[in-house]
Amino acid sequence: MARQECLCVVSHVCQAWRDLILGNPLLWQTFSNINHSPEWTREQLRRSGSVPLDIDIPICYLGLVSHEPSWEPILSQLTRIRSMKISWSPELVSHDLS
Protein backbone atom coordinates (compact mmCIF):
# COMPACT_ATOMS: atom_id res chain seq x y z
CA MET A 1 0.00 0.00 0.00
CA ALA A 2 1.40 3.41 -0.98
CA ARG A 3 2.01 6.04 1.67
CA GLN A 4 -0.87 8.24 0.45
CA GLU A 5 -3.26 5.29 0.58
CA CYS A 6 -2.20 4.58 4.19
CA LEU A 7 -2.82 8.23 5.07
CA CYS A 8 -6.31 8.02 3.60
CA VAL A 9 -7.11 4.88 5.60
CA VAL A 10 -5.83 6.39 8.86
CA SER A 11 -7.73 9.63 8.17
CA HIS A 12 -10.97 7.65 8.51
CA VAL A 13 -10.32 6.54 12.11
CA CYS A 14 -11.86 9.62 13.70
CA GLN A 15 -12.36 13.34 13.05
CA ALA A 16 -9.32 14.33 15.14
CA TRP A 17 -7.01 12.06 13.13
CA ARG A 18 -8.59 13.24 9.88
CA ASP A 19 -8.00 16.89 10.79
CA LEU A 20 -4.42 16.12 11.81
CA ILE A 21 -3.58 14.20 8.64
CA LEU A 22 -5.33 16.47 6.15
CA GLY A 23 -3.96 19.59 7.82
CA ASN A 24 -0.28 18.56 7.84
CA PRO A 25 1.40 19.29 4.48
CA LEU A 26 4.56 17.39 5.48
CA LEU A 27 2.60 14.14 5.41
CA TRP A 28 1.70 14.73 1.74
CA GLN A 29 5.10 15.82 0.38
CA THR A 30 6.19 12.36 -0.81
CA PHE A 31 4.85 11.10 -4.14
CA SER A 32 5.57 7.49 -5.04
CA ASN A 33 3.95 4.90 -7.27
CA ILE A 34 1.62 7.44 -8.81
CA ASN A 35 -1.17 5.37 -10.31
CA HIS A 36 -4.23 7.49 -9.74
CA SER A 37 -6.03 10.04 -11.83
CA PRO A 38 -4.54 13.49 -12.42
CA GLU A 39 -7.34 14.85 -10.22
CA TRP A 40 -6.14 12.79 -7.23
CA THR A 41 -2.56 13.88 -7.90
CA ARG A 42 -3.72 17.52 -7.88
CA GLU A 43 -5.51 16.88 -4.57
CA GLN A 44 -2.32 15.46 -3.07
CA LEU A 45 -0.44 18.54 -4.29
CA ARG A 46 -3.06 20.77 -2.69
CA ARG A 47 -2.70 18.89 0.60
CA SER A 48 1.09 19.27 0.44
CA GLY A 49 0.74 23.05 0.52
CA SER A 50 4.01 24.72 -0.41
CA VAL A 51 6.46 22.26 1.19
CA PRO A 52 9.27 20.77 -0.93
CA LEU A 53 8.30 17.55 -2.74
CA ASP A 54 10.03 14.16 -2.82
CA ILE A 55 9.23 12.22 -6.00
CA ASP A 56 9.71 8.54 -6.84
CA ILE A 57 9.28 7.79 -10.55
CA PRO A 58 8.81 4.10 -11.41
CA ILE A 59 9.95 3.23 -14.93
CA CYS A 60 7.81 0.35 -16.14
CA TYR A 61 8.43 -0.58 -19.76
CA LEU A 62 10.79 0.49 -22.50
CA GLY A 63 11.83 3.48 -20.43
CA LEU A 64 8.35 5.03 -20.28
CA VAL A 65 6.79 6.31 -17.10
CA SER A 66 3.52 4.62 -16.27
CA HIS A 67 0.41 6.73 -15.86
CA GLU A 68 1.91 9.76 -17.58
CA PRO A 69 -1.23 11.94 -17.21
CA SER A 70 -0.94 11.60 -13.42
CA TRP A 71 2.60 13.00 -13.55
CA GLU A 72 1.65 16.19 -15.41
CA PRO A 73 0.44 18.04 -12.28
CA ILE A 74 3.66 17.11 -10.44
CA LEU A 75 5.89 18.21 -13.30
CA SER A 76 4.15 21.59 -13.22
CA GLN A 77 5.66 21.99 -9.71
CA LEU A 78 9.32 21.56 -10.70
CA THR A 79 10.48 24.44 -8.49
CA ARG A 80 9.14 22.59 -5.42
CA ILE A 81 10.90 19.27 -6.07
CA ARG A 82 13.52 18.62 -3.39
CA SER A 83 14.45 15.10 -4.47
CA MET A 84 13.63 12.77 -7.33
CA LYS A 85 14.32 9.02 -7.40
CA ILE A 86 13.96 7.03 -10.60
CA SER A 87 13.52 3.29 -10.10
CA TRP A 88 12.75 0.29 -12.25
CA SER A 89 12.33 -3.44 -12.00
CA PRO A 90 13.98 -5.64 -14.62
CA GLU A 91 10.94 -7.93 -14.75
CA LEU A 92 8.79 -4.99 -15.86
CA VAL A 93 11.05 -4.11 -18.77
CA SER A 94 10.25 -5.67 -22.13
CA HIS A 95 12.80 -8.31 -23.14
CA ASP A 96 12.07 -7.81 -26.85
CA LEU A 97 14.35 -4.85 -27.53
CA SER A 98 15.08 -5.74 -31.17
Image (cartoon, rainbow, N blue to C red):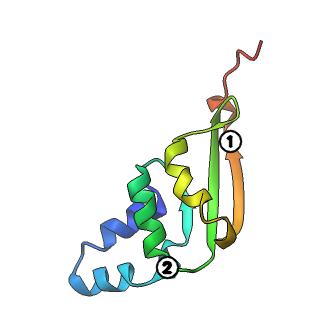
Residue 3 position (above or below residue 16) = above
Would you say residue 33 is visible in this rendering? no
Residue 87 position (above or below residue 49) = above
Front-most of 63 and 1? Answer: 63
Residue 88 position (above or below residue 34) = above
Which residue is drawn at the image coordinates 64% and 51% (left, top)? 57
Mark 2 lies on residue:
49
How far separated are the C-alphas under marks 2 and 1? 29 Å
Residue 73 left/right relative to 52: left
Q: Position of residue 97 (x, y in %)?
A: 75, 17
Q: Position of residue 34 (x, y in %)?
A: 51, 51
Residue furthest to the right in view is: 98
Residue 41 left/right relative to 9: right
Q: What kind of element bears circle 2?
A: loop
Residue 32 left/right relative to 79: left
Kind of residue at badge 1: Trp
Q: Quarter of the image containing the C terminus?
A: top right
Q: Position of residue 84 (x, y in %)?
A: 70, 61
Mark 1 lies on residue:
88
Q: What kind of element bears circle 1?
A: strand
Image quadrant in which you'd find residue 14? bottom left
Image quadrant in which you'd find residue 96? top right
Kind of residue at badge 2: Gly
Residue furthest to the left in view is: 14
Q: Earlier in the sequence, mark 2 or mark 1?
A: 2
| Neighbour tally class for label 2: few under 14, some 14-19, many 20 plus, Cα within 10 Å | some
Residue furthest to the front in view is: 76
Which residue is drawn at the image coordinates 59% and 60% (left, top)? 76
Q: Position of residue 71 (x, y in %)?
A: 55, 51
Would you say residue 94 is visible in this rendering? yes
Pointer 2 and pointer 1: residues touching (CB < 8 Å)? no
Which residue is drawn at the image coordinates 49% and 79% (left, top)? 49
